[in-house]
Image (cartoon, coloured by chain):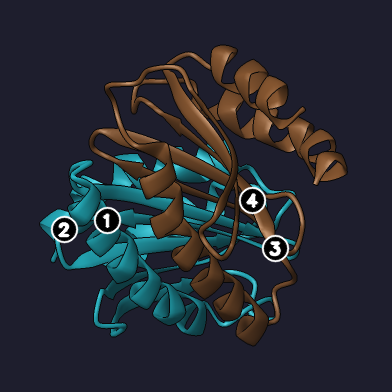
Chain colours: A cyan, B brown
Amino acid sequence: MFAETLKRVVDNVDGGIAAVVMGLDGIPVETYVKQKDRVDVNTVAMEFSFILTQVRKAGDSLQVGSLEELSVKAQRLVLVCRMISPQYFVAIAMAPEGNFGKARYLARVSAPTLAAAL
Amino acid sequence: MFAETLKRVVDNVDGGIAAVVMGLDGIPVETYVKQKDRVDVNTVAMEFSFILTQVRKAGDSLQVGSLEELSVKAQRLVLVCRMISPQYFVAIAMAPEGNFGKARYLARVSAPTLAAAL
């Protein structure tokens, strides 16, 4: 269920590398890897589970409402993280030249399907 | 110099609230506020100076190259942060219904001007 949705997202994003559904505790629920040699998406997402927790705390103290999405662009990797429940998120790793807008869009529209399967 | 560039960015983004040039140590260099009643951009950016530092550390350990951009969407606020030098970033705060793509674009194209003024 998760696997099919993650595959559909990654395969439909230009430059898509991998995607994972993970808890904020850093434990992966499901992973789909399209390009094996690029990056270990579980390690990346695990680092970001900690960062998402920090961002959520910051958001709480700033009273800007619940965290929905976090995106990071580094020289060799773009990561789009979207919360699918208060404790779980989906992370999509892609090449920096990939289609960032489409990754955000697919993360958003697939979130209810992923949340329903939790 | 900073002020004019920040004003041009915020005023040209639909939903633009404020922008700040800040060091990763959380100390603001220059701030421009368009909508005073929405959010304290210095407080927001200060929280994110800590988070950017964490993201940069994560990027270093993951060997994905240097951090270029971080965007966060919460229910009531969108924040686009772009590194303009290894120690300084520009943060643009905007309404969630604002033009996210244009904020990213203007942050990117104004980065060299801001960096030159540091």
Label 3, secondary structure: give it: loop
The residue depicted at 45 percent of the width and 65 percent of the height is: B51
Report the chain holding disc 4: B
Q: Residues within 10 Å of mark 3 (few under 14, many from 20)?
A: few
- Residue that label 4 marks: B89
The residue depicted at 83 percent of the width and 40 percent of the height is: B117
User: Do marks 3 and 2 share a subunit?
Assistant: no
A2 versus B108 height, above or below? below
- Front tag of 4 and 1: 4
Q: Residue A105: x and y, percent?
A: 43, 37
User: Do marks 4 and 3 share a subunit?
Assistant: yes
Label 1, secondary structure: give it: strand
Task: Give yes or no for contact between labels 1 and 3 (Cβ–Cβ under 8 Å).
Answer: no
Report the chain holding disc 3: B
- Front tag of 2 and 4: 4
Task: Give yes or no for contact between labels 3 and 2 (Cβ–Cβ under 8 Å).
Answer: no
Q: Residues within 10 Å of mark 1 (few under 14, many from 20)?
A: many
Check disc 4 and give the amino acid type.
Phe
Task: Give yes or no for contact between labels 2 and 4 (Cβ–Cβ under 8 Å).
Answer: no
Say the numbered circle drawn on residue A105.
none
Say the numbered circle drawn on residue A83.
1
Estimate the spatial distance between the alpha carbons at disc 2 and disc 1, rounded to whole Å: 6 Å
Report the chain holding disc 2: A
Check disc 2 and give the amino acid type.
Ser
Q: Is residue A67 left or right of residue A18?
A: left
- Residue that label 2 marks: A85
Label 4, secondary structure: give it: strand
